Image (cartoon, rainbow, N blue to C red):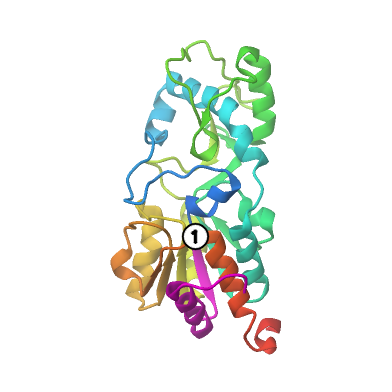
Amino acid sequence: MSSVLGADQQALIDLVRRYPRLCVLTGAGVSTDSGIPDYRDEKGEWKRPPPMTHQVYMKSHLGRQRYWARSLVGFRLLAHATPGRAHQALAALEAQGFIEGIITQNVDRLHQKAGSRRVVDLHGRADLVRCMQCNLLVRRHVLHDHLATLNPDWVGMEAEIAPDGDAYLDEVDFSTFRLPECPRCGHGILKPDVVFFGDNVPRGRLERAMSILDDSQALLVVGSSLMVFSGFRFARHAASRGMPMACLNRGHTRADALYSLKCEAPIDESLTALLEGLSDVDGSRLMG
């Protein structure tokens, strides 16, 4: 290997050798090397103002104007992001049979772009927009093109980028920002096809995620503080089954008391080391 492993990184390799079918649960920390900011600091506290909630989005026209104006400025970062070494290592581990599936709290689709095949997008997909009245799905870039046509003065505006394609625009009047109507029903609210804070994960999606966990031998949490219950529930479920759990994340997480191993090292480096370390096992295992 290219560098000396820390004790926790070696322990992670040893754990996966003992339990070679992983369920991997990922959060924002797995995508920071792709240039996408995360939400929380090492204490698990918000780094920035909390994001839009489902209730505000659905009830407030001005809230939706604010959301889409900021998105028109900030989403290009998310749209053009490419997988980092962490995504690539996880895809390679899945291809070699060490990962049963990935449950991701991210909405950036970078796991799929890296080549991971069994992925549950727990919080949905940021590249799609849904009409909340007639259920029409449209590609987000199509909606953004329309937003740019309706609001040409906002195109090219510069701002600090926030998580999930948001942008910080302070002291800006959003009341003149024009929103498009649903192209099919003409009056439904268009919303990103993601689970906003305060909303619930659809039952079928949750069941698919739990199926991956139940088919696995161990749970590996990567880049998530699990402060949101939608992710924490998987650690709690694994603990109830007596399943070994490891975490690769810097700082406090909600499930720290449940882990058998906590590795506070760089995510991309540690997953690359895990891939290289597991490649030293018997070749017949890799062919399985």
**For residue 24: magenta?**
yes
Q: Which one is nearer the viewer's eye here, 265 or 129?
A: 265
Which residue is under mark 1? 266
Q: Quadrant of the N terminus?
A: bottom right
Q: Amino acid at mark 1?
A: Pro
Residue 223 is a magenta residue: no
Residue 17 location, x and y as percent?
53, 83
| Residue 233 figure quarter | bottom left
Front one among 284 and 207: 284
Instruction: Give the side of residue 1 with respect to residue 267, left or right.
Output: right
283 on left or right of 51: right
Residue 281 lies, in percent from the top left, at 62, 86
Pick the quarter of the image with the C terminus.
Answer: bottom right
Residue at the spot x=65%, y=27% of the render?
144
Which residue is rendered at x = 65% and y = 89% of the image? 282
- Note whether residue 185 is visible: yes
Residue beneath the point at 45% across and 78% down = 11
Q: Is residue 93 left or right of residue 237?
A: right
What residue occupies the far top of the structure in this picture?
Answer: 176
Classify mark 1: residues with Cα within 10 Å, few (<14), some (14-19) or many (20+). Answer: some
Asked if 43 appears above or below 174 in the picture, the reply is below
**Front residue of this view, candidates 250 and 103:** 250
**Picture coordinates of residue 18 (x, y %)?**
49, 85
Residue 160 x/y as whole percent: 51, 29
The image quarter in which residue 170 lies: top left
Q: Which element type, helix, strand or loop, lies under badge 1?
A: loop
Look at the picture and state if 253 lies above or below 282.
above
Question: For the image shown, how many numbered marks are present on the structure?
Answer: 1
Residue 136 seen in this snapshot: no
For the magenta stretch, what is the residue range? 1-25
